[in-house]
Amino acid sequence: MKRRMHVITVFFGIALGMFLYDAISNRFPSFKDGFIEGYNSDSVEKHYESCYLTLDPENFSAMPDSIFNKKTGKWIPARMMEVYVRIPMKENPNGLRLLWLLPCVILLFAGFLMVVYNFVLMTIAVGKSIVFEWINVRRIRRIGIGFSILFVVASGINIYFNRLALDLIEIENYKIITSSFASNLLMFGAIAFLIAEVFAVGLRLKEEQDLTI
Protein backbone atom coordinates (compact mmCIF):
# COMPACT_ATOMS: atom_id res chain seq x y z
CA MET A 1 0.00 0.00 0.00
CA LYS A 2 2.80 2.38 0.95
CA ARG A 3 4.68 1.61 -2.25
CA ARG A 4 1.54 2.17 -4.32
CA MET A 5 0.98 5.55 -2.66
CA HIS A 6 4.59 6.50 -3.47
CA VAL A 7 4.10 5.53 -7.12
CA ILE A 8 0.84 7.51 -7.38
CA THR A 9 2.44 10.53 -5.72
CA VAL A 10 5.45 10.43 -8.03
CA PHE A 11 3.19 10.00 -11.07
CA PHE A 12 1.03 12.96 -10.04
CA GLY A 13 4.17 15.00 -9.34
CA ILE A 14 5.53 14.29 -12.82
CA ALA A 15 2.20 15.25 -14.42
CA LEU A 16 2.01 18.44 -12.35
CA GLY A 17 5.64 19.30 -13.14
CA MET A 18 5.10 18.82 -16.90
CA PHE A 19 1.99 20.99 -16.80
CA LEU A 20 3.68 23.79 -14.85
CA TYR A 21 6.77 23.63 -17.05
CA ASP A 22 4.64 23.98 -20.17
CA ALA A 23 2.69 26.87 -18.66
CA ILE A 24 5.82 28.73 -17.52
CA SER A 25 8.11 28.05 -20.50
CA ASN A 26 5.55 28.56 -23.28
CA ARG A 27 3.11 31.13 -21.92
CA PHE A 28 4.67 33.20 -19.17
CA PRO A 29 7.71 34.54 -21.12
CA SER A 30 5.53 35.92 -23.91
CA PHE A 31 3.05 37.41 -21.43
CA LYS A 32 5.90 38.93 -19.42
CA ASP A 33 7.66 40.38 -22.48
CA GLY A 34 4.45 41.81 -23.90
CA PHE A 35 3.50 43.33 -20.55
CA ILE A 36 6.93 44.92 -20.00
CA GLU A 37 7.27 46.20 -23.55
CA GLY A 38 3.73 47.59 -23.53
CA TYR A 39 4.25 49.29 -20.18
CA ASN A 40 7.57 50.86 -21.26
CA SER A 41 6.16 52.24 -24.50
CA ASP A 42 6.00 56.04 -24.44
CA SER A 43 3.87 56.72 -27.50
CA VAL A 44 0.71 55.55 -29.19
CA GLU A 45 2.66 54.27 -32.21
CA LYS A 46 4.86 51.99 -30.08
CA HIS A 47 2.13 50.59 -27.85
CA TYR A 48 0.77 47.09 -28.49
CA GLU A 49 -0.45 43.96 -26.72
CA SER A 50 1.08 40.53 -27.30
CA CYS A 51 -1.00 37.35 -27.25
CA TYR A 52 -1.48 33.88 -28.71
CA LEU A 53 -4.26 33.31 -31.25
CA THR A 54 -5.73 29.91 -32.05
CA LEU A 55 -6.86 29.85 -35.66
CA ASP A 56 -9.53 27.84 -37.42
CA PRO A 57 -8.96 27.61 -41.21
CA GLU A 58 -12.04 28.36 -43.30
CA ASN A 59 -10.98 25.62 -45.73
CA PHE A 60 -9.04 22.71 -44.21
CA SER A 61 -8.04 21.36 -47.61
CA ALA A 62 -6.32 24.60 -48.57
CA MET A 63 -2.81 25.75 -47.64
CA PRO A 64 -3.13 29.55 -47.81
CA ASP A 65 0.31 30.31 -46.31
CA SER A 66 3.87 29.23 -46.92
CA ILE A 67 7.08 28.72 -44.96
CA PHE A 68 10.69 28.74 -46.12
CA ASN A 69 12.44 25.36 -46.05
CA LYS A 70 16.15 26.04 -45.42
CA LYS A 71 17.13 22.49 -46.43
CA THR A 72 15.81 22.91 -49.98
CA GLY A 73 15.86 26.70 -50.25
CA LYS A 74 12.22 26.71 -51.34
CA TRP A 75 8.92 27.95 -49.98
CA ILE A 76 6.44 25.19 -49.14
CA PRO A 77 2.65 25.38 -48.52
CA ALA A 78 1.54 25.66 -44.90
CA ARG A 79 -1.49 26.30 -42.75
CA MET A 80 -1.42 28.11 -39.40
CA MET A 81 -3.19 26.69 -36.35
CA GLU A 82 -1.69 28.98 -33.71
CA VAL A 83 0.19 32.26 -33.99
CA TYR A 84 1.78 34.75 -31.60
CA VAL A 85 0.95 38.32 -32.58
CA ARG A 86 1.46 41.89 -31.41
CA ILE A 87 -1.79 43.83 -31.55
CA PRO A 88 -1.41 47.58 -32.15
CA MET A 89 -3.48 49.73 -29.81
CA LYS A 90 -5.33 52.93 -30.67
CA GLU A 91 -4.58 54.48 -27.31
CA ASN A 92 -2.23 53.90 -24.41
CA PRO A 93 -4.11 52.47 -21.41
CA ASN A 94 -1.02 51.57 -19.36
CA GLY A 95 -2.18 53.03 -16.04
CA LEU A 96 -5.69 51.58 -16.28
CA ARG A 97 -4.36 48.22 -17.41
CA LEU A 98 -2.04 47.99 -14.40
CA LEU A 99 -5.00 48.37 -12.04
CA TRP A 100 -6.22 44.88 -12.89
CA LEU A 101 -3.21 43.16 -14.48
CA LEU A 102 -0.95 43.58 -11.46
CA PRO A 103 -3.45 41.97 -9.04
CA CYS A 104 -3.95 39.18 -11.59
CA VAL A 105 -0.22 38.45 -11.66
CA ILE A 106 -0.14 38.43 -7.84
CA LEU A 107 -3.10 36.02 -7.71
CA LEU A 108 -1.48 33.74 -10.30
CA PHE A 109 1.70 33.65 -8.24
CA ALA A 110 -0.28 32.99 -5.04
CA GLY A 111 -2.26 30.16 -6.63
CA PHE A 112 0.91 28.63 -8.04
CA LEU A 113 2.64 28.73 -4.63
CA MET A 114 -0.43 27.25 -2.92
CA VAL A 115 -0.44 24.27 -5.29
CA VAL A 116 3.30 23.58 -5.16
CA TYR A 117 3.71 24.15 -1.40
CA ASN A 118 0.85 21.86 -0.39
CA PHE A 119 1.88 19.21 -2.90
CA VAL A 120 5.41 19.19 -1.45
CA LEU A 121 3.96 18.81 2.06
CA MET A 122 1.80 15.93 0.82
CA THR A 123 4.81 14.22 -0.72
CA ILE A 124 6.80 14.54 2.51
CA ALA A 125 3.85 13.21 4.52
CA VAL A 126 3.44 10.17 2.25
CA GLY A 127 7.18 9.50 2.58
CA LYS A 128 6.68 9.37 6.37
CA SER A 129 3.65 7.06 6.01
CA ILE A 130 1.30 9.85 7.11
CA VAL A 131 -1.47 9.33 4.57
CA PHE A 132 -5.02 9.06 5.94
CA GLU A 133 -5.00 12.11 8.18
CA TRP A 134 -7.17 15.22 8.22
CA ILE A 135 -4.15 17.44 7.62
CA ASN A 136 -3.71 15.78 4.23
CA VAL A 137 -7.37 16.33 3.41
CA ARG A 138 -6.90 20.03 4.10
CA ARG A 139 -3.73 20.10 1.99
CA ILE A 140 -5.48 18.48 -0.97
CA ARG A 141 -8.34 20.95 -0.64
CA ARG A 142 -5.83 23.81 -0.69
CA ILE A 143 -4.37 22.36 -3.88
CA GLY A 144 -7.88 22.42 -5.34
CA ILE A 145 -8.35 26.02 -4.21
CA GLY A 146 -5.01 26.95 -5.78
CA PHE A 147 -6.01 25.46 -9.12
CA SER A 148 -9.39 27.19 -8.88
CA ILE A 149 -7.66 30.55 -8.39
CA LEU A 150 -5.42 29.85 -11.38
CA PHE A 151 -8.45 28.88 -13.46
CA VAL A 152 -10.42 32.04 -12.65
CA VAL A 153 -7.51 34.45 -13.17
CA ALA A 154 -6.14 32.75 -16.30
CA SER A 155 -9.62 32.63 -17.82
CA GLY A 156 -10.14 36.32 -17.09
CA ILE A 157 -6.84 37.22 -18.78
CA ASN A 158 -7.73 35.01 -21.76
CA ILE A 159 -11.12 36.69 -22.13
CA TYR A 160 -9.48 40.13 -22.16
CA PHE A 161 -6.90 39.27 -24.82
CA ASN A 162 -9.37 37.30 -26.93
CA ARG A 163 -11.83 40.21 -26.97
CA LEU A 164 -8.93 42.49 -27.86
CA ALA A 165 -7.97 40.24 -30.77
CA LEU A 166 -11.53 40.00 -32.11
CA ASP A 167 -11.96 43.77 -31.98
CA LEU A 168 -8.66 44.65 -33.68
CA ILE A 169 -7.62 41.71 -35.88
CA GLU A 170 -9.10 39.92 -38.88
CA ILE A 171 -6.99 37.30 -40.68
CA GLU A 172 -7.75 36.27 -44.23
CA ASN A 173 -8.72 32.60 -44.66
CA TYR A 174 -8.92 32.08 -40.88
CA LYS A 175 -11.33 32.44 -38.01
CA ILE A 176 -9.98 33.36 -34.59
CA ILE A 177 -11.09 30.80 -31.99
CA THR A 178 -11.85 32.35 -28.63
CA SER A 179 -11.26 29.47 -26.22
CA SER A 180 -11.19 31.73 -23.18
CA PHE A 181 -11.51 29.23 -20.33
CA ALA A 182 -8.45 27.39 -18.99
CA SER A 183 -10.35 24.10 -18.68
CA ASN A 184 -7.23 22.07 -17.83
CA LEU A 185 -6.78 24.08 -14.62
CA LEU A 186 -10.43 23.53 -13.73
CA MET A 187 -10.01 19.80 -14.29
CA PHE A 188 -6.97 19.63 -11.97
CA GLY A 189 -8.91 21.55 -9.32
CA ALA A 190 -11.94 19.25 -9.61
CA ILE A 191 -9.73 16.15 -9.32
CA ALA A 192 -8.06 17.58 -6.21
CA PHE A 193 -11.43 18.30 -4.56
CA LEU A 194 -12.67 14.80 -5.49
CA ILE A 195 -9.60 13.15 -3.96
CA ALA A 196 -10.00 15.28 -0.82
CA GLU A 197 -13.62 14.18 -0.42
CA VAL A 198 -12.69 10.52 -0.93
CA PHE A 199 -10.05 10.86 1.81
CA ALA A 200 -12.58 12.65 4.05
CA VAL A 201 -15.23 9.93 3.63
CA GLY A 202 -12.66 7.25 4.37
CA LEU A 203 -11.50 9.05 7.52
CA ARG A 204 -15.09 9.51 8.77
CA LEU A 205 -15.83 5.82 8.26
CA LYS A 206 -12.61 4.93 10.10
CA GLU A 207 -13.49 7.22 13.02
CA GLU A 208 -17.03 5.77 13.22
CA GLN A 209 -15.61 2.25 13.19
CA ASP A 210 -13.16 3.11 15.95
CA LEU A 211 -15.99 4.49 18.09
CA THR A 212 -18.09 1.35 17.72
CA ILE A 213 -15.26 -0.94 18.82
Image (cartoon, rainbow, N blue to C red):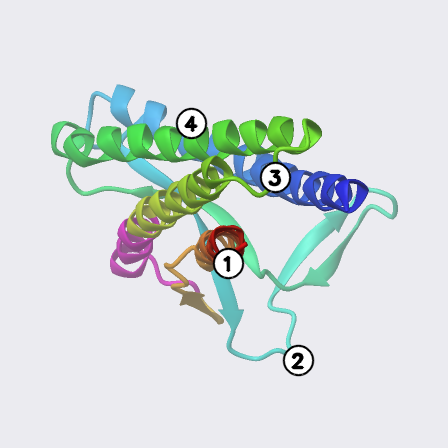
Query: Going 66% across and 44% down the picture, which residue do you hit?
Result: 12
Please name which of the two marks, 3 or 4, marks the residue nearer to the observer.
3
Q: Secondary structure at mark 2?
A: loop
Verify whether residue 145 appears in magenta. Answer: no
Please name which of the two marks, 2 or 4, marks the residue nearer to the observer.
4
Residue that label 3 marks: 131
Please name which of the two marks, 3 or 1, marks the residue nearer to the observer.
1
Magenta stretch, residue numbers: 158-171
Q: Position of residue 109 (x, y in %)?
A: 38, 29
Q: Secondary structure at mark 4?
A: helix
Depth order, front residue of 106/203: 203
Crowding at mark 2 (Cα within 10 Å: few <14, some 14-19, many 20+) = few
Residue that label 1 marks: 205
Q: Are marks 2 and 4 in contact (CB under 8 Å)?
A: no
Please name which of the two marks, 4 or 1, marks the residue nearer to the observer.
1
* Earlier sequence position, callout 4 versus callout 1: 4
Crowding at mark 4 (Cα within 10 Å: few <14, some 14-19, many 20+) = few
Residue that label 2 marks: 61
- Label 2 – label 4 distance at C-alpha: 35 Å
Q: Amino acid at mark 1?
A: Leu
